Image (tube, rainbow, N blue to C red):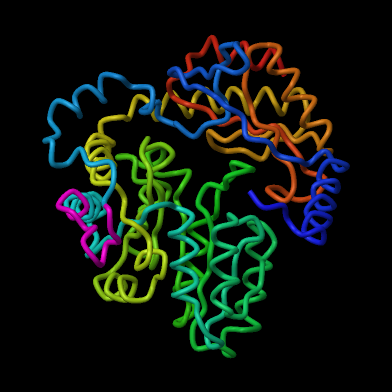
Amino acid sequence: MNRLPESWQAWLAGRMAEKEAAHNQRRLQPLARQGVYVRHQGRRLVNLAGNDYLGIGADTEWLAEFWAQTPPEERLPSASASQLLAGHAPAHRRLEHTLTELFQAPAAVGFSSGYQMNQGLLAALAGGPHTLVLADKLVHASMVDGILLSKAPFRRYRHNDMAHLADLLARHHRDYERIVIVTESIFSMDGDEADLAQLLRFKRQYANVALYVDEAHAVGVRGATGLGCAEAAGCIGEIDFLVGTFGKAVGSVGGYLICTDLVRRYVVNHVRPLIFSTALPPLNAAWTDFVLRRLPALHERRCHLAAISRRLADAVREKYGVCPSTSHIVPLITGTNQSALDKAAELMRHGFYAAAVRPPTVPNHQARVRFSLSAALDEETVARLAEAL
């Protein structure tokens, strides 16, 4: 390959030197998954860095059942086209129908990834100067990127600070035709939860306010039938743009939007990642549909996950004094980048693979080890982890 111009080499090398000096350089790690374990450098380690919250990715019985009932025409590894060309297969239509049935909603849209979903939706829904976006300070990078692409005016309210959000709404609600509040339901790094009840009170108070909620880390693990925090709060029908991903608890890949028929028609015509990206492989759409139909029956897995998560969060609080988590995402906040790397390395020596998460994924001086728990973990393993903290 041709050598880069010197100016490019100097710039790239300088940026990477900055990362290295800040103990913030990332590297791809080759990991082979084996149920609840990963193999890393010849060792078998308990996997605490993935998002297989219900253990579906490790469920070989489910996979065997799926293969046995899936016809050859749906075992396609590529859609080979965008949804608007020739990529919207019967498996995609069936998946959307399942979503509308489960959520008792008028319409649903599937996406190739959760990142594309948030980026594309917010860019299209918030576009222009007449919509104000009010986003929680800790929303995911995909949402931030979508907001920036929209070129809409936006404000970040302090994380889960409803008083700050109330002040922003009071000051700005007359200045814009539309306002959209953007939040996650369970936050990906702190593992705490949005106050959906208060957000809905704001929506009812102001006629021009819509609510965008990302259930990426809640679908599957919250609610009586696993539909997320909105189901648990009894407010699915009141959220204007209810989104989530299939790549975590559902054990697949892709994202979804639950919405009205009007919103679906708008999305199909305006969301660029949907229009210009190859659709999900029919195989993945069929697998996702297979899993979603079984989510309501996984109550025991959800209860077990909640119990081991509480146990670990309590252990972190006991030993370190603080842990914001109320979910299966449990952070051990160490502060500096190096301390997070050191703690992750120490845990690896004890047989646990957990990610050291550093800025910009988390705020400066809040580097951490992020424990991402799975219902496939037994109580003994979690007890050993608590002892190793």
Does 270 lie within the magenta span?
Answer: no
x then y, percent, for residue 24: 78, 41
Q: In which quarter of the image is residue 59?
A: top left
| Residue in the picture at 67% in, 66% down | 157
Q: Is residue 218 above or below residue 2?
A: above
In the shown orientation, is residue 268 left or right of residue 71?
right
Does 91 lie within the magenta span?
Answer: yes
Q: Residue furthest right?
A: 21
Give the camera-side residue of 321 and 142: 142
Q: Is residue 350 above or below residue 293?
A: above
In the shown orientation, is residue 327 left or right of residue 137?
left
Query: Most prominent secondary structure in the magenta stretch?
Result: helix
x then y, percent, for residue 49: 57, 30
Give the camera-side residue of 323 and 267: 267
x then y, percent, for residue 112: 37, 53
Q: Quadrant of residue 83?
A: bottom left
| Residue in the picture at 24% in, 34% down | 294
Give the camera-side residue of 357 and 25: 25
Question: Where is the C terminus found, in terms of image quarters?
Answer: top right
Q: Quadrant of residue 151?
A: bottom right
x then y, percent, for residue 196: 49, 57
Residue interval drawn in magenta: 80-93
| Residue in the picture at 46% in, 65% down | 212
Q: In this view, does 177 lie above or below 62?
A: below
